[in-house]
Image: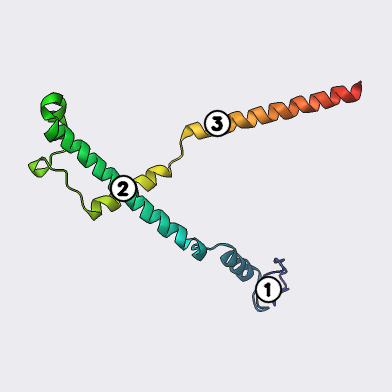
Amino acid sequence: RCHLGISSSFPPTYAPPRTFCGQARAYAAAAVAMQLVAPSRFLDGIVFAVFLLFVSGFGLFIFGEFHKMCVITEAKKLGYFATMMDKMFPFAKKQFVFNLTHIILFAILISLLSMSHHPAQDILKDEAEKRRKREEREEKEKKAAAKSD
């Protein structure tokens, strides 16, 4: 009990000072329970960021090679597609140029798109739950039929 007569229960691992009362204790417990930054995950974040930068840079490089192939190397064979590609991506001297800013922005785009939730995941989850419930119901029916015999 605190000095206001309010009692609250806490996990035994956390013992706040006796001067705290109900709301202050709850706030202190929430602060201990919820961490915004997990120092043990720093290395994971650094490795992921470096990997993502390499993937982003490689993707832009491959697109640059594709642009060069379409607009310069194979332009006569591709005909209208080469013209359309040049109009969609107008670069000076028909050269695809990118720098670190482009790589970082493309990496952010990749990470945002990879965090999106596809509706097909919900459908697969629902189907799996229905199948599991149906199997459980069939097992219960078999057990009930075995008991009645």
Left or right of 72? Residue 148 is right
- Identified at 38% across, 47% down, the residue is 111
Residue at the far front in the pictured view: 73
The one of 52 and 11 positioned closer to us in this rendering: 52
**Residue pointed to by mark 1:** 15
Q: Residues within 10 Å of mark 2 (few under 14, many from 20)?
A: many
Q: Position of residue 20 (x, y in %)?
A: 64, 75
Q: Can residue 67 be seen here?
A: yes
Left or right of 145? Residue 108 is left
Label 2 – label 3 distance at C-alpha:
30 Å
Helix, strand or loop at label 2? It is helix
Q: Position of residue 30 (x, y in %)?
A: 59, 64
Q: Nearer the viewer, mark 1 or mark 3?
A: 3
Q: Can residue 87 be seen here?
A: no
Helix, strand or loop at label 3? It is helix
Left or right of 149? Residue 5 is left
**Residue pointed to by mark 2:** 56
Q: In the image, which disc is placed on residue 124?
A: 3
- Identified at 11% across, 40% down, the residue is 94
- Identified at 85% across, 25% down, the residue is 144
Q: Amino acid at mark 2?
A: Ser
The one of 134 and 56 positioned closer to us in this rendering: 56
Label 2 – label 1 distance at C-alpha:
48 Å
Q: Residues within 10 Å of mark 1 (few under 14, many from 20)?
A: few
Q: Are marks 2 and 3 in contact (CB under 8 Å)?
A: no
Helix, strand or loop at label 1? It is loop
Q: Are marks 1 and 3 in contact (CB under 8 Å)?
A: no
Left or right of 73? Residue 61 is right
